[in-house]
Amino acid sequence: MHNTPVMTDTDLWTYRDYESWQGSDISGFSVEAIDGEIGSVDQATYDVASSFLVVDTGPWIFGKKVMLPAGVIDRVDMNDHRVFVHRTKDQIKNAPEFDEANFRDQTYRSDLGTYYGRGGAGYREWNS
């Protein structure tokens, strides 16, 4: 029987493989979706179980900023200054826009969790 790991709410807001780049500032790094570059890291947080990136998508979708929960990040390449996320450009493009006034609000985070979490439009299995 095949067991697929289930991402919990805590996992969604926790970096994978953080030990390999812990203590490094990844602001300004390029962000690479599954199907190509999507923008750059405008801001990164490192709060336990509530970390995220703010990605500036630049001219690709007219300067929209989106908040990506840390759990969607696959890996960080410190040599090439790239952050690889396990989402498509369309999933990121269609994500709720970053709300600077409410980004720490639990309701806003819950809405993002619904979008990126299991069953949401921005969800993607790790083995897909």
Image (cartoon, grey):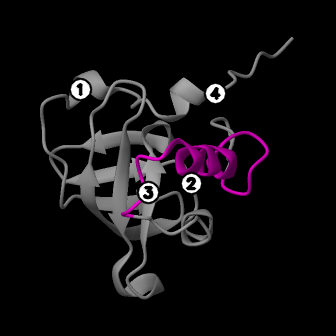
The amino acid pointed to by label 4 is Met
Lower sequence index among marks 4 and 1: 4
What stretch of residues is rendered in magenta? 100-122
Q: Which residue is mark 2?
A: 87
**Mark whose residue sits in front, 2 or 3:** 3
Percent coordinates x, y for residue 64 in the rendering: 42, 78
- Which amino acid does the dot numbered 1 rest on? Ser
Mark 2 to mark 3 CA distance (whole Å): 23 Å
Closest to the observer: 124 or 62? Answer: 62
Badge 3 or badge 1: first in the primary sequence: 1
Q: What is the secondary structure assignment of the residue under circle 1?
A: helix
Q: Work out how far the residue at label 1 is from the one at label 2, CA to CA, in angstroms.
A: 21 Å
Magenta residue check for 54: no
Where on the picture, by quarter, is residue 91? bottom right
Q: Which mark is residue 115?
A: none
User: How many residues crowd mark 4 within 10 Å: few (<14), some (14–19), many (20+)?
Assistant: some
Q: Nearer the viewer, mark 4 or mark 2?
A: 4
The kind of residue on which mark 3 rests is: Asn
Q: CA distance from mark 4 to mark 2?
A: 15 Å
Residue that appears at 74% across and 50% down: 120
Res 8 → quadrant: top right
